[in-house]
Amino acid sequence: MKNSNLAISDRRFLKSPFFSCYHHENVLYGVYNNRLYPLNCGYDNQEHYRHLRQFCCLYDVPETPLRITGKDKKEFLEKIFTRNIDKIKTGRAVYAFACNHDGGILMDGVLMHPSEDEFIYVQANGDFINWATANIGNLDVKIDDFNSWVLQIQGPTSLDVLSKITDIKLEEFTYYSCSKVKILNKDFYVSRSGWTGEKGFELYSDGDNFSGEELWNYLLEAGKEEKLIASDIASMHIRRIEAGILDYGTDFDQRFDPFDLGLQKFIDFDKSDFIGKEALLKKGNSPMRIRGIRCPSEKPVVDDELQSVDGKVIGSVTAGAWSPFLETGIAIVQLNYDLESLSEGKLRTNSGIHDVKICDLPFHDKEKNIPID
């Protein structure tokens, strides 16, 4: 990853309960939802990537879960999300995004229905709670930032760790299942999801009344046989690009609608009205503006310039990495034009001009068999 480093005070940002478990003076932090999170702890990124692909890794991640309750919660969620909320059964979760009135994606994340009385929305970076609250109107709904903190355990052996720390039956806990569990006598939510394209699960605390250091050490001890190690976003970053997992605020924002990203399958046009529906109906299908590139001779980095073969600027890199598995540089790019049929281009980097192949996302496991199986 390409990072710009600034020395700033950390007093205005929240430190996670797990901060002391990995902090040292050379850790590179990012800020996300006003939370500090470890971008790079100094690990060997390629080694940790391989470990993630073979075994499993523990990650401190900064998403913010919000609890939605009240007798009108379903009506409210139908209004602000494009998914059909009535289809989300208790114990299930879905990927869900909210659109503004112009159809641009305002926020994306995982929407969980862990119990009959509540939904949990794990939002990406941004001030979603104030926008959502402004759209409650006269409905009986409460949106609560309940000080939940999030961990992910990802990799082929991760579900074996889950079976050790909870009483969840893995054969019943299928992809995008969710539940409420007790760990170390504290309440947590868990969903079988993640940000790597690997098998994995996410843990969300029910508040902050727990010891982060105790939980962190407990998980690493419980996962010893599964070779669980602590890692950072740097190794996760490589895998999420391979899997074509987009990051809100990095790869796209409100300027992009679901058609631009190829996400129209997550819009239920048959349901009752939702914010942005009219604009999206008028637009209909359009070419994707987010695609991938393969660059065998260089690792792409943020803001590298994508050109057509004849040198015209056609886009730029939003996230890049070297893929050990694919043995090539890969990147997610924003396109400036309708270029769906274009398959070749040039990448301008600090080291010069490189030939690239333009392709659809993801780069690997297009059917999502890895996390599902």
Image: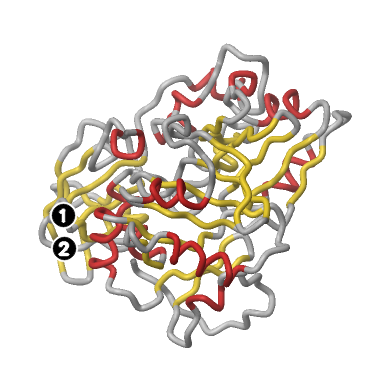
Residue 101 in the image: state x and y as whole percent: 65, 31
Q: Is residue 141 above or below residue 329?
A: above
Q: Amino acid at mark 2?
A: Glu
> Residue 2 vs residue 125: left or right?
left
* Colouring scheme applied when the structure was drawn: secondary structure
Residue at mark 2: 298
Q: Is residue 204 above or below residue 28?
A: above
Residue at mark 1: 295
Residue nearest the viewer, comparing 229 with 309: 229
- Which of the 4 image quadrants contains residue 179? top right
Circle 1: element type: strand
Residue 178 in the image: state x and y as whole percent: 56, 37
Q: Quadrant of the C terminus?
A: top left
Q: Around disc 2, counting alpha carbons within 10 Å, would you say few (fewer than 14), some (14 to 19), or many (20 or more)?
A: many
Q: Amino acid at mark 1?
A: Cys
Q: Quadrant of the N terminus?
A: bottom left
On residue 84, which mark appears? Answer: none
Residue 183 in the image: state x and y as whole percent: 60, 54
Label 2–label 1 contact, CB within 8 A:
yes
